[in-house]
Image (cartoon, rainbow, N blue to C red):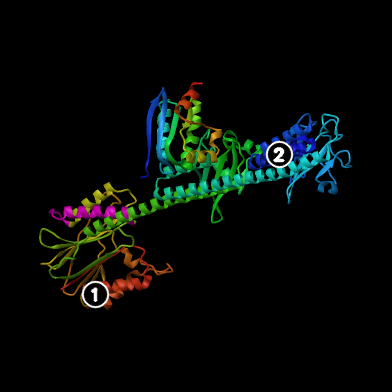
Amino acid sequence: MKNFSINHRTRSGYSVIDLHGELDAHTASQLEDALKDLINQKKCNIIVNCAELEYIASAGLGVFMAYIEDVRADGGDIKLTNMSDKVYNVFDLLGFPALYDILKDESDAIDNFNS
Amino acid sequence: MTSSTNPEENNSRFELKTVLETTRMLLESRSKDFILQNLLLIIMGKLLVPKAGILLFDNKTGLYTLSKIKGSFNFEQNDTVDLAFSKTNKSKSHVTYDMCQDNVPNLISDMDGSIFFNLRTVNRHIGYLFISKKAVDKPIQQSELEFIESLSIISSAAIANSEMFDELKATNQNLDHRIHELNTLFDLSKEFNLLVDREKISRIFKFALLGQLFVRSFFLLYKNTDSVEVLASSNLSNPILDSTAVSIFELTENVVEVNTNLADSFPLLKQNDIAALIEISIQNKKIAVIGVGKRANNKPFTDSDFNFLRSLSNLAIISIQKTYLLEERIEKERIEEELSIAKAIQDGLLPNPIPAVDGLDLSAITLSSSQVGGDYFDIAQTPDSNYVFAIADVTGKGYPAALLMANLQSMLHVLLPVDITLATATERINNLIFKNTPSDKFITFFWGKFLKDKKIFRYVNAGHNPPLHLPKNSTQFQEMDKGGLLLGALQTMTPYHETDIPLQKDDIVVLYTDGVNEAQNPDGDEEFGEDRLKECILKYRDRSAQYIQDQIIRKVNEFTRGHQFDDLTLLIFKVS
């Protein structure tokens, strides 16, 4: 088992998911479960903190693609924060900044939600 | 006289300084826009030119794009124009509008006095720097022309640099993209190898596809032996109909870009914004079709994207095929395992070893054509210390026959200790079998009891091939055919009959099933028959029961050339 883990918490009323380690084909389903869980609870304002995310593969990005519409349909959004350059490059390479808010940190994301 | 007091020298020093500063600034810059902007502003400011623009040459079209303009032009920025300069003019470092005879469009309202400066590097024409006449009524001086030409040369180099840099950047990004695709494939092939769960494989496939291609909707159709199934999909508005899946699978060849016509004929394509259908082949055989929706950023798909899709789909399909094969193998192994357990159980129902019976030389064998069979024989002791010999053949083969055979065996053993006649016991067995089995299942059955003190063989034949009795000193076989109806066909109406035949030393009795007499030659047009059986018994009548048995089997095998079609059972005894 690779070292990947997800932590849930709440900040200023927003759901925050902390990603740790490597998000790839093997671990993508864990992120899927976490997102599905939040969507089922109608917690659709989601901040994904990538500070501890070391690597992301396409399958990991695919999970975000698969659920963004559900989240937005419920009036929410997924905002990504605290990305390392290495991780950001992958998002950028595949064109994700066009569709997702990628922000410096959680406070920015919260401001963004509030505005 | 100091240099600062000479205005001309002062001016040229200023120009030199500008050229140097500009050089440094331009060469350090990686942004084309910045370079063009500065070139225009420096020249406009220094020469008091109210209108200037950069026209960049497009190699493919042969036209010029107004990449940057300052002041009032007759064109918008980024418009394209045709500058039909003559060959001679093209080779000049600058072309004065007033002097040239060429067909040049009116870039500005008053073209008089305007000049085109050639922007070029050693090996390439980049375009033109265009300037109008000065705002003040003064012609452009020779020194000013030289100044602009110097700047043009530097700027050309800078533009070429920045273009190269952009190209390099694009190439690099392309390369990064390819590497990422490879990583994705590598990542998945590793993951798929570990997976036997089809649902999980198709989910990971889905995520990798969505993430890598930046799409939201897709479907993967897979051609099975007799249908087209949806292996994976995402974000479809409705489930895919079987007929639609088949039609789309059939119509897709190589890559089909979905146009309005096609979208109108298939709501599936229209509703889900499917942009392209791609054929997936393994060893030149179309096995799957994938439809992908528009990209989230509306960028068109490239050949390289389609190739990636093919590789990814291939990987997933092979993994999924692998899971089917694995399941088949497990299922086959399970069935084989069950079958061998069943065979062991059935073997346990037959007497093993064949008991030694006082006063008889005895041999018996059964050979099943499939692993479990419907033939049965038994040799069992009765409470009066005599022995019963039974043989039976259940209709059909395999499991159903084996079950019924086991049923018969248990009845027989339950009834043996009960003090009733063979005829009554047969009647009870018949009634039970009739009750327990469907009407198309029945059993031919024969059994007999050897009363050793009286040397009498008492038998009941319920529809079985008549066993053969060969009395000593006779070449005529007696057929033991009396008894009653075969078992399980009808409720007992008329009672079964028992028949006694006296036996003497060296008499031979042969019980057999139709696997012997109905064994067929390889052409299937001739049966082994009773005559060959009798011939064999006569020939070896002086040998042991075991020997006679072995010879019969050898003859049957010779006749069929080793192709056994039915279960075969023999029970032979010789009075000693």
Name the foreground residue: B226 vs B415. B226
Question: What number of labels is visible?
Answer: 2
Q: Which residue is mark 2?
A: B17
Q: Position of residue B12 (x, y in %)?
A: 76, 39
Which residue is found at the position 77% from the left and 45% from the top? B62
Q: Position of residue B502 (x, y in %)?
A: 17, 68
Name the foreground residue: B78 vs B204. B78
Q: Position of residue B361 (x, y in %)?
A: 17, 71
Provide the residue span drawn in magenta: B397-421
**How packed is label 2: few (under 14 Cα within 10 Å), some, or many (20 or more)?**
few
Residue B370 horizontal side relative to residue B119, left or right? left
Give the residue type at disc 1: Tyr
Which residue is found at the position 26% from the left and 63% from the top? B481
Q: Which residue is mark 1?
A: B547
Query: Which chain does the residue under circle 1 lie in?
Result: B
Is A93 included in the stretch rendered in magenta? no
Q: Secondary structure at mark 1?
A: helix
Which residue is found at the position 66% from the left and 41% from the top? B24
Which residue is found at the position 45% from the left and 26% from the top? A107
Give the Cα separation between the discs numbered 1 and 2: 123 Å
Residue B393's quadrant in the figure? bottom left
Is B401 included in the stretch rendered in magenta? yes
